[in-house]
Image: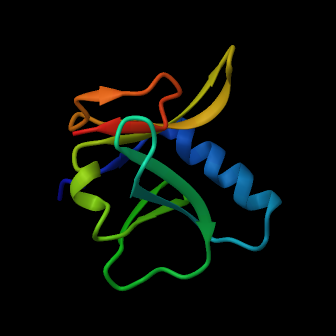
Amino acid sequence: MDTPVTLSSSAAKRINAILSENGDADFLRVSVEGGGCSGFSYKFDFGRTIETEDLVIERDGAKVAIDSVSLPFLEGSEIDFVDELIGASFKIHNPNATANCGCGTSFSI
């Protein structure tokens, strides 16, 4: 079965590292909110409660939850973790985005 959103191995590795240091969370929650310089923005939180409507993605022991409202904006995307000269961060490779801001945290469709 194809998952509408995928998780890279580097993202799974980073999620597992963060969760091993933080006993207050069990998974990464990714959501989309209105706002940001391009119209929508990605939000990353760590949580303990998975809702019944959430899509849960697992890779190498790491879990990501995406709520049902955010899922249509993220379909076909890959959640990645990159370590670049300007910093390390989770990054969404979203084929639905028609424009992205320079910081990579907001997008438009």
Residue 70 at what x, y percent from top left? 32, 61
Point out the residue furthest to the right here.
21
Q: Relative to the observer, which residue lies in front, 40 or 95?
A: 40
Q: Is residue 92 above or below residue 6?
A: above
Tell me the residue at 66%/54% (across/down): 16
Q: In the rendered image of this protein, does residue 6 appear above or below residue 23? A: above
The quarter in which the C terminus is drawn is top left
| Image quadrant containing the N terminus | bottom left
Residue at screen point 35% across, 74% down: 54
In this rendering, would 84 be left or right of 107? right
Visual colour scheme = rainbow
Residue at the image point whose x is 79% and y is 71% from the top? 23
Q: Is residue 109 above or below residue 103?
A: below
Which residue sits furthest top? 85
Q: Position of residue 83 (x, y in %)?
A: 64, 24
Where in the figure is residue 21, as x and y percent of width and height?
82, 58
Which corner quadrant of the image does residue 78 belong to?
top left
Q: How many marks?
A: 0
Instruction: Looking at this view, name the residue that lies furthest to the left.
Output: 1
Let me know if residue 4 appears in the view. no
User: Nearest the camera: 7 or 77?
Assistant: 77
Front one among 10 and 86 = 86
* Most foreground residue, 55 or 10: 55
Q: Residue at x 23, y 33 (%)?
A: 95
Please indicate, yes or no, whether residue 84 appears anywhere in the rendered image. yes
* Residue furthest to the bottom: 52
Horizontal side of residue 39 vs 16, given as left or right:
left
